[in-house]
Image (tube, coloured by chain):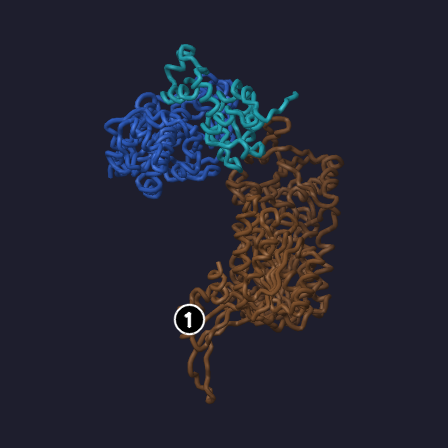
Chain colours: A blue, B brown, C cyan
Amino acid sequence: MKIPYYPGCTLSTVAKGFDASARESAKVLGFEMEELKQWNCCGAAFPLTPDNLAGLAAPAKVLSNARRMGDSVVTLCSVCYNVLKRTNKVLRDDKEKRAVVLGFIEEDYDGGLSVVHFLEVLRDRIGFENVKKIAKRPLKGIKAGAYYGCMLLRPFEDMGIDRCEAPTIMEDFLSSLGAVPVDFPDRIECCGAHLSMGRTDVVEKLSGNVMRSAAEKGAELIVTSCPLCQHNLEKSQGAVFSKTPGYRTVPIVYFTQLLGLALGQDENELGFDKNLWDARPLLKERGV
Amino acid sequence: MPRIGVFVCQCGNNIEGTVDTNKVSEDMKNLPGVVYSRNYKFMCSSPGQEMLKTAIKEHRLDGVIVSACSPHMHEKTFRKASEAAGLNPFRCEIANIREQCSWVHHDKTKKTGTVKSIDLTRMAVERLKRNKPLKKINIPVTKRALVIGGGIAGIQAALDIADGGRDVILVEKEPSIGGNMARLSETFPTMDCSQCILTPKMVEVELHEKIKLYAYSEVEKVDGYIGNFTVRIRKKAKYVNEDLCTGCGECIEKCPFKADSEFELGLNKRKVIYTPFPQSVPNIPVIDAPNCPKIQKDKCGACAVVCGPKAIDFKQTDTVVEEKVGAIIVATGYELMPNERFGEYGYGKFKDVISGMQFERLASSSGPTGGNILRPSDGKVPKTIVFIQCVGSRDEKKGVSYCSKVCCMYTAKHTMLYKHKVPDGQSYTFYMDIRSAGKRYEEFVRRAIEKDGAMYLRGRVSRVYERDGHVMVCGADTLSDSQVEIEADMVVLATAIVSRKGADILARKLGIGYDRYNFYNEYHPKLRPVETVTAGIYLAGACMGPMDIPESVSMGSAVAGKVLALFSAEEMAREPIVANVNERVCNACWDCVTACPYSAIEKFSVKDRQGEAVRTHAKVNEGVCQGCGVCVAACRSKAIDLAGYTDEQVFSAINAF
Amino acid sequence: MNIKLENSSLKSPVVELIERISGELVSNCYQCGNCTGGCPVAYAMDIAPTQMIRMLQLGRVSEVLEAESQWICVSCLQCYSRCPKGVSAASLFEAVRQINLRSGRNHAEISGLAASFLKDAPQQALVCGFRKLVG
């Protein structure tokens, strides 16, 4: 099974570990992520004002490219997923806007593409029970906190991947790998997003709340699906909590890094060294 | 030769403003059959009606046209006046020259309005010539009422009808009557103990010789029509013989098995053989069969062993009875939107986040905590409590759009009860508005704030989560433009009042209307609030929308008045606008039977002297037929026609145009 | 403070423009405060989301356009997710931003960004940041 794959700008540069671990894991699970032959940045922000059609141009181009390769496109980054899925809905439902945008980018697109997140592929096409069966190196009960952030879930009418207030898809994923998912209240609260450009104080507070919330519930490791969340959480952990006595710093990893590990990949090839806090010592300590 | 009188009303300036009524009445004199025609300022006034009656007598009129306002307004008035003058009321017709003419034309020269009024009146005259002098249909009435639902509204209705001298059958689905009011601790604004004021009425119902109580029973099927309903009632198996049981309670003592208590809303358990609460009426326990090992697996049976009168019968089955009644009152009440609906408040998973009704159980002295406010999670006394109003109500997106009416009042009451029981505790109430419109309600809420230290915050709560054994509440206070965070020990959600599960199913059984929230529809929201459009079926209480106890009781009494009025005459007179079948033409295709929305047409078998069936034809039940005319449209052979609206009448009016 | 309400300022062209761009109707908001209650950055805003909408209802648009709040909003959509009336305060903030940006009033200068940030920030932060803060 081949699924067209849209990596996005960040996964091709700063978050290469996310990308690499996902591709390898896919192979083990029996499908191939075929990178789009041509792609451009999705824009990283879905235009919240419906009159902003220019903001739809870039993601529309991605969708039309992907459509040439198949009937679905898989993404890893929550933000790309959000932008592409919401753009897809507008192009499908609003004939007028579709005509204007597609005319502008000089592309054809029939609206027949389905935008899926890697987690959806695991849940709906492969099945978490099958992932569990294939997992050779289960995570030996490591307490992992799943951090969803905003873009993966909201708004529910467009995204629909899981319930907004008490989602379970990442926890189910972690359970299938043998980890113990930790539910913490701030797992659906914003990390601060683009405010890392100029208002790092806000990011520190917001991401700090997330980290503190997870620590209070005993999480030994945080799992994310978005390079910006990962960056913000790491930066806040560094700034605020290294100064707080008694606080134990925890690794913040991408979910596919854990997946790759559980599926038997070499831990040194998963990009753990690129993270500010290396997860390998914890994994070694637990005998994974 | 007909002798028709035409009366054209000026209606002050309402009609005369754009219609020359004098010209209209003059023009009518040219029509064959019209022997008298005039206009008048206000036909509906006393002098106007007197003039009509005098004209009928003096000119020996055998038909009357009143060209005036809509028949909806005054057809009854003029028909009554005609009848008083000795004319058959169905020989009086209205031509609507107001709503359908003068009010929609603005030509002050009156040319357009007058021409149209002349047309409308002429059409009415031609139609009238074919009007038959119909007689009202009398049908017998069974003078017995059925009340479905034994909550406070149903109880009040039953008592008032019974005290009025008529028999009542009260059907209640739970093992005991009392409804939601039995769950409450104290009631606003008097702070009366709910069960203390309710139980005397419950006992009165049980002892009243004119009330037959079917508890633990449900209405299964309803047939018939006003004055003549046949109701099938299923008495669910209690596994206890009602005639032998003395209500001693030994069986309940001895039963070793428990299940979640429905009455306590999951805060406590009850035995498998149980009465919902100590003051249950009837005081006869029932066995929860799915959870009873004796019934499921033939193990145990302790209750039967200790029962002195030997009233336990594990082999009992449901029984179905049939009752004939003349009127049905629906008083099935409400429930609360389940906590599980609210994601931002924990999806019902946080033990210390409870609903308003659950708080009532905690506050109630016969409740699971003996009237002490204790946290369900660890039994400790909460020192900080947060009440959240409008949970699910006024929420188009994720809940219901309406306001649940009673929550502002009961939340204020809760803050006061809490303060009285936990004097060193502090309550916070998040509200959007305070709706305290009833008598002494506003003063009640102010007492909570001014005397009992309740802290009211204007804003909603965005979310609630657990931390370190506390419940963290994040909301807003718009009055001070702040985001507010509270570390609470307990949170009470004033969840929305919704219709009961299965309300739509019951409505369809009865043939009454309901809205998108499954609340039952009244005939007219202002002027006929206790009736439905289905004759003979009435509504009382919260089954039609959120309401408090005084309103429910008022409705119960109001409905009793309607029913007693219905039962006051020997027979009931119905309008004769019913369909009838020309048996000679009917070819028994049964299209009319299929088309009739009221199941008012039967397949009638004509028999010869030996009792052999010779042929069949359609026959209309005059008691049920509502005169809608669908059968007339459906009939292929033109065998069926509608009295008062015959094809002949209608076509003659069209041809006169 | 004392405000003199004028009929003309209530549905002023600017408010109508904001409604048109955002697709929201400010009169739908019944000021319950849920958005402010759930907004993670409300503490850092000078005008909270509920207040922002109230000001638009009252026609006090210039105060909203000049506020810092719109630049702090992270478009996390928690407000929209919880609003019982389905109003998106985030979309209104976006419309206010757009009016400023389209008029040439940027909120960030590329030259002002720290070198360390440029070095290790994920690309998406820059792209998203520029979309929100620069015209």
Residue extending farthest to the bottom is B610
The one nearer the camera, C100 or B190, is: C100
Q: Can residue A160 be seen?
A: yes
Q: Quadrant of the C terminus of chain A?
A: top left
Q: Amino acid at mark 1?
A: Trp
Q: Is residue B6 left or right of residue C126?
A: right
Q: Position of residue B142 (x, y in %)?
A: 63, 72
Q: Quadrant of the N terminus of chain A?
A: top left
Q: Eyeballing the image, is C68 above or below B324?
A: above
Q: Which residue is mark 1?
A: B590
The one nearer the camera, A57 or B393, is: A57
Q: Is residue A103 left or right of residue B116?
A: left
- Report the label total: 1
Q: Position of residue B217 (x, y in %)?
A: 58, 65
Q: Is residue B568 left or right of residue B607?
A: right
Q: Is residue A194 left or right of residue B349?
A: left
Q: Can residue B215 be seen?
A: no
The one nearer the camera, B356 or B466, is: B356
- Chain letter of mark 1 equals B
Residue extending farthest to the top is C111
The one nearer the camera, B451 or B53, is: B53
Badge 1: residue crowd in 10 Å (few <14, some 14–19, many ≥20): some
Q: Eyeballing the image, is B422 above or below A212?
A: below
> Callout 1: helix, strand or loop?
loop
Q: Position of residue B53 (x, y in %)?
A: 68, 64
Q: Quadrant of residue A105?
A: top left
Q: Position of residue B103 (x, y in %)?
A: 57, 48
Q: Eyeballing the image, is B442 above or below C99?
A: below
